[in-house]
Image (cartoon, grey):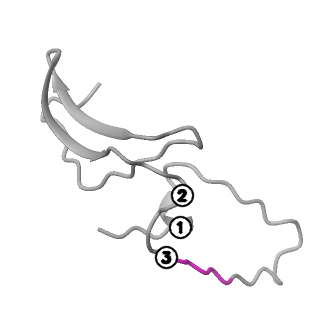
Amino acid sequence: AFPPGGISVFASQLHTHLAGRGVRTALVRAGRELEVLQEDKHFSTHYQGDVLITKCTYNTEDRRGPTVSHVDAEHLQKYFSFMN
């Protein structure tokens, strides 16, 4: 459930798998569509526009055991760059 004060959408990423041809995100309240937040009627996984590449460099020479990677909500921003 959303908090009593609601939420603020500051970014959205449309995504479908290979069969996707169109995709949209809409705000619906009490069963009524209020606003389309993002829509792509001609979605294609083969044309995504520009590409951003993030390169991370680590040094784990001081560690005795393996370095295990994981991504969860707490650690997400350590592994991905956010742009808005």
Q: Residue at x 67, y 84 (%)?
A: 57
> Which one is closest to the eye, mark 1 or mark 3?
3
Amino acid type of the residue that numbered disc 1 sits on in the rendered structure? Lys
The residue tagged 2 is: 75
Q: Which element type, helix, strand or loop, lies under badge 3?
A: loop
- The residue lying toward the viewer, choosing from 3 and 30, is 30
Residue segment shown in magenta = 51-57
Please, is residue 54 above or below residue 70 in the view? below
SS assignment for the magenta stretch, majority: loop
Q: Quadrant of residue 66?
A: bottom right
The residue tagged 3 is: 52
Determine if the magenta segment contains residue 17: no
The local crowd at label 1, few if under 14, some if 14 to 19, many if 20 or more residues have their Cα within 10 Å, is few
Amino acid type of the residue that numbered disc 3 sits on in the rendered structure? Leu
On the image, the x and y values in percent for residue 59 come to 74, 84
On the image, the x and y values in percent for residue 73 come to 49, 49
Q: Look at the image and tell me in which quarter the N terminus lies.
A: top left
Q: Look at the image and tell me in which quarter the C terminus lies.
A: bottom left
Upstream in sequence: badge 1 or badge 3: 3
> Which one is closest to the eye, mark 3 or mark 2?
3
Residue 78 badge: 1
